[in-house]
Image (tube, rainbow, N blue to C red):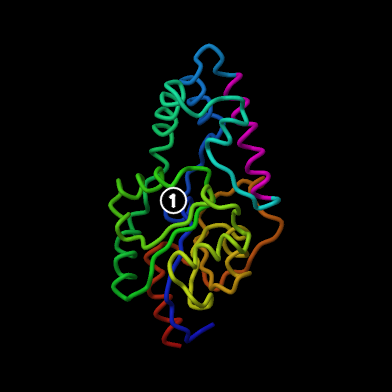
Amino acid sequence: MQGVAVDAVIFDWGGTLTPWHTVDLAEQWRVYARAYDPNHGDEVAAALRAAEDEAWRVAREEHRSTTFDAVVRSAGLEPSGRAHARALEAYHAFWEPHTFTDPDAGALFAQLRERQVSVGVLSNTIWAREEHEAVFRRDAVLHLIDAAVYTSEIEWTKPHPEAFTAAMKAVGAVEPEQCVFVGDRLFDDIYGAASVGMRTVLLPHSLIPDDQRGPLDGKPDAVITRLSDLLPLLDAWQST
């Protein structure tokens, strides 16, 4: 592992590039449902929550992905038209305070690119690419990301090897051992990336609920306490 050059660093999003927030996941759908159908808000919210729970169960157990629109359809709603547009606006407003990019990220991305190290993102998400790019654009880091893979656009979720392979291909990484993955989850991120031969770095500040944990924990090659700790770590790896 040591003494090998690093060509690319791929980051998880939620809990890694965006610091972990404990969010009331039922409330996100109550917000959406009240805007979509004010007369049946509780009923609609319950159906949406059940549909999302099932989608994430499939992601955890079978590592198959889905999309926001598919979740909405599974709840018996139509993800288009004025009602959906109102609801989606309310939903995004609910999430905005929880999406701000870590202040360390911009400088880290710029320094990596100065060293000719590609910057990538791989996120388990039901959100569309446009929504993630809007977040990164708002926080002035979108232009510093060389490539991103969102599982809403591919068949698989982390920790499936194909998700990591897609991310490595997107950033142009040829050898997995020359690619580093940084994440906050020991199963999805660390176990998954290590299983394809990537080096792994854990940022362990997320309070991950028990029902979101995987069946086993991966063992990271290193642990950092903040994103800015990554560059000294990479320097140490490459000089040893």
Closest to the observer: 2 or 150? 150
Q: Say few, some or many: other residues with alpha carbon within 10 Å of mark 1 (under 14 / 14 to 19 / 20 or more).
A: some
Q: At which x and y percent is residue 97?
A: 39, 39
- In the rendered structure, does residue 55 fall within the stretch colored magenta? yes
Q: At which x and y percent is residue 203?
A: 49, 61
Q: Tell me the amino acid under the disc marked 1.
A: Pro
219 shown above or below 238? above
Residue at x 63% of width, y 60% of height: 160
Closest to the observer: 182 or 89? 89
Pick the quarter of the image with the N terminus: bottom right
116 shown above or below 188? below
Q: Which residue is mark 1?
A: 19
Residue at x 32% of width, y 76% of height: 115
Q: At which x and y percent is residue 151?
A: 53, 51
117 shown above or below 185? below
Residue at x 50% of width, y 31% of height: 28
**Residue lying at the far top of the rendered structure:** 39
Q: Which residues are magenta?
A: 43-60
Horizontal relation, residue 1 to residue 117: left or right: right
- In the rendered structure, does residue 102 fall within the stretch colored magenta? no
Residue at x 45% of width, y 31% of height: 91
Horizontal relation, residue 181 to residue 139: left or right: right
